[in-house]
């Protein structure tokens, strides 16, 4: 199938996707909101008053969900390489958090406070070359885990999007070193053919940075 035919087929599926239609009707910026809503309902991730870090936040649907759940005493700090339209209650930092300057900006916003929860919906731009895409995906997962080791409070949680394939088993082992409990989740809102899976680490072991 040619790329143009593939693109047209994807667009037809996207337009007819019930989660896309629902997101438009309910004011969410993308269908991804329903993944987080489902995961929160199952695992009670979001609690009023928390400090939550949203990695790969644009266009902002996860931040929308988080802000609504945390209430006025909660705080959301979001980061993305892409721009994100301003959202009340969210402090947004634009840039690549792999770069020290961006990481320093995030740490400055936190002002010494540790996060209760890090959520990562990071994914690379897909090239169509499976081996390369998987390697880049797992690299982003590793970055999210490393970032969490720096920014989470003891007992905190990490929710990270992964893709099953090369490197997944090794990453899962890394998660288990850093968290008391690690589980996998596949939300109904994830497209069926997608290999994406969310790993949830609970009970961050504060000493795991030196142990890893």
Image (cartoon, rainbow, N blue to C red):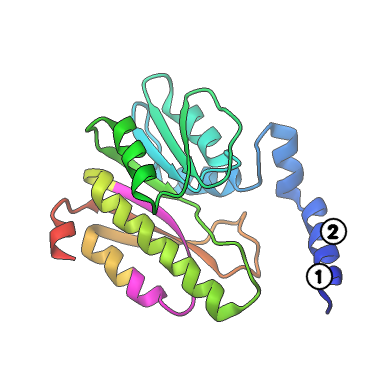
Viewer-closest of 195 and 8: 8
- Per the image, the residue denoted by label 1 is 6
Label 2 environment density (alpha carbons within 10 Å; few <14, some 14–19, many ≥20): few
User: Mark 1: which secondary structure?
Assistant: helix
Extreme residue in the front direction: 101
**Is residue 51 shown above or below 15?**
above
Residue 163 visible in the picture: no
Quick one: label 1 or label 2, which is nearer the N terminus? 1
Q: How many marks?
A: 2
- Residue 144, quarter of picture: bottom left
Numbered range of the magenta stretch: 157-171
**In the drawing, does residue 32 fall left or right of residue 145?**
right
Residue 84 visible in the picture: yes
Extreme residue in the top direction: 72
Q: What residue lies at 62% left-to-right and 54% top-to-bottom?
A: 189
Residue 94, horizontal then vertical, whole percent = 49, 40
Of discs 1 and 2, which sits in the foreground?
1
User: Mark 2: which secondary structure?
Assistant: helix
Q: Which mark is residue 12?
A: 2
Q: What residue lies at 45% left-to-right and 48% top-to-bottom?
A: 42
Q: What residue lies at 41% left-to-right and 34% top-to-bottom?
A: 77
């Amino acid at each position: 199938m040619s790329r143009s035919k593939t693109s047209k087929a994807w667009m037809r599926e996207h337009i007819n996707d019930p989660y896309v239609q629902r997101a438009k009707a309910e004011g969410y910026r993308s269908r991804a909101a329903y993944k987080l809503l489902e995961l929160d309902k199952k695992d009670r991730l979001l609690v009023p008053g928390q400090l939550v870090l949203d990695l790969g936040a644009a266009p902002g649907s996860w931040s929308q969900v988080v802000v609504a759940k945390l209430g006025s005493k909660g705080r959301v700090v979001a980061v993305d390489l892409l721009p994100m339209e301003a959202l009340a209650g969210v402090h947004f930092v634009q840039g690549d958090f792999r770069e020290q300057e961006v990481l320093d900006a995030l740490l400055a916003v936190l002002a010494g406070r540790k996060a209760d929860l890090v959520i990562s919906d990071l994914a690379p731009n897909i090239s169509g070359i499976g081996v390369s895409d998987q390697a880049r995906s797992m690299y982003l997962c590793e970055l999210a885990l490393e970032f969490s080791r720096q920014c989470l409070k003891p007992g905190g949680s990490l929710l990270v999007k992964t893709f099953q394939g090369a490197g997944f088993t090794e990453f899962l082992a890394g998660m288990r070193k850093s968290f008391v409990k690690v589980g996998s989740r596949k939300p109904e809102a994830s497209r069926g053919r997608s290999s994406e899976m969310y790993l949830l680490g609970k009970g961050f072991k504060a000493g795991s940075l030196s142990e890893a």
